[in-house]
Image (cartoon, grey):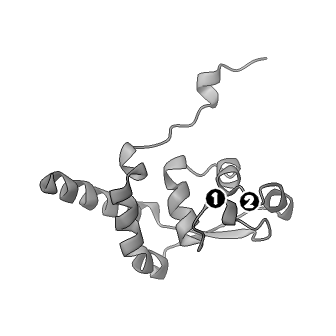
Amino acid sequence: MTMPLHRLIRDPGADVFYTPEWQLMIETHLPLILARSDNAILSCSPAQAYKYEGDLAGLLTELNVNPCYHWLLMRMNNMRTWTDYDGVKTVLVIPNYTFISRLTEVHKTTMTKIR
């Protein structure tokens, strides 16, 4: 049985997650985000890690992480580009998404007032 293509495509999330301003806001708050006790761990198998060496976005997609959080997880795990993923690390730190949503709402409100 075939599946329509539109059912396979993931929602990339709101545009705000892909703006340089949002990324700067995250970079500014990264120490605070990393210090939170409600962060969690996302695990993958060694086989998955090896398969996605140099392709963090591919690994996060396989692990069903919403695409709008891919860049954030890359930065939280001390990577600057997708190719920095070494294919050895099998645990990644993930944020409390509710906290990230609150930061994003404050950011959007601030950006609206600035513009």
Residue at point 61% right, 26% down? Answer: 7
- Secondary structure under tag 2 reads loop
Q: Is residue 37 visible?
A: no
Q: Residue at label 2?
A: 54
Amino acid residing under circle 1: Trp
- Secondary structure under tag 1 reads helix
Left or right: where 92 falls relative to 28 = right
Residue 97 location, quadrant: bottom left
In the displayed structure, 6 sits above or below 40; it is: above
Q: Is residue 105 visible?
A: yes
Left or right: where 68 falls relative to 54 = left
Residue at point 64% right, 59% down? Answer: 82
Q: 100 or 88, which is in the foreground? A: 88
Callout 1 crowding tier (Cα within 10 Å): few <14, some 14–19, many ≥20: some
Q: 115 or 90, which is in the foreground? A: 115
* Mark 1 vs 2, N-terminal side: 2
Spatial CA span between label 1 and label 2? 6 Å
Q: Residue at label 1?
A: 82
Callout 2 crowding tier (Cα within 10 Å): few <14, some 14–19, many ≥20: some
Counting the numbered discs, the total is 2
Residue at point 79% right, 17% down? Answer: 1
Left or right: where 22 falls relative to 72 = left
